[in-house]
Amino acid sequence: MKSIIQIFTTILLTVVICSSCTKNEIHYGEFEKVTPDQVMLKVNYNIAYAANPFVQIKINGARVSALIQTRYPYPGGGYGTLGDSRPDYLVTKPGNQEVSISIPKKGTNIDSVLLYKTSIAVEAGKAYTLHLTDTAATTSSLLALDDFTLPDSGAVRYKFVNLMPNVPSVDLYYGTTLMASGIGYLKESDYFTMKIPAGTVLAWTVRTAGGTTALATYSSVSTVLNRRIYTIFATGYTGRTDNVRKPYLAFFLTR
């Protein structure tokens, strides 16, 4: 009798273990593999209205985003921005693509107020960021080509974009070291590489070109991670003090 009970117990444990193995499969979620005939696109939304409405991003009339607010590189977010810190991109087709930003009717994808619309020309197999800034009739955009070439171990790679509508030209510093100089409005620097600093992480600072006064600063160890690629951008309006439109220095991961 005892032997029968032992055999039954062994069989039962085997069934439970096998069943558990089936039920505990790890699912990493749905994802789409980018093919060489597709395009990767990030939309860096910095249209800064005082009311800071929730908006949607559409490509060719189809909504591709959650509802977001200003200072949001979508998808993915960044440091000193809304969103998280994933180096994600949307996937679209090559050729001419229409990108629009609108306030939707409540509970729908239907446009209520169209804030901005532009047409971009993109090539297959490439990655881009569409930077959006300013408001109303002067809302503007910059389509930037992104480069995924990783730096060597012990180094970080950056480029810098000036999205401050009322600052014609700015300089970027890391501590007291000038990293990018004289970057005009809606312009970007070349990529530059920095060795990961030893010791205390210093503050990044954006200043009016040739000036000494900081317009905005940002400091975080997350901005100097090994073998990462970042886009740094200055946004907002100098002279503004409200949380929506004041100057910011922010980062998002390209890789």
Image: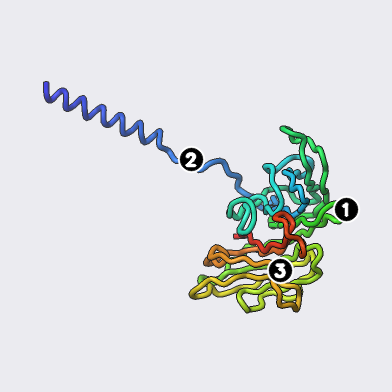
Instruction: Give SS at disc 3.
Output: strand
Residue that mark 3 sits on: 215
Label 1 and label 2: CA atoms lie apart by 46 Å
Q: Residue at x 62, y 70 (%)?
A: 204
As drawn, 165 above or below 30: below
As drawn, 87 above or below 10: below
For discs 1 and 2, the disc positioned in front in the rendered view: 1
As drawn, 220 above or below 67: below
- Left or right of residue 216, residue 61 in this image: right
Q: In which quadrant of the rendered view does residue 12 lie?
A: top left
Q: Residue at x 71, y 57 (%)?
A: 128
**Could you tell me residue 85's position as x and y percent?**
58, 55
For discs 1 and 3, the disc positioned in front in the rendered view: 3
- Left or right of residue 254, residue 115 in this image: right
Residue 123 visible within the image: no
Instruction: Give SS at disc 1.
Output: helix
Label 3 and label 2: CA atoms lie apart by 45 Å
Residue that mark 1 sits on: 137
Label 1 and label 3: CA atoms lie apart by 25 Å
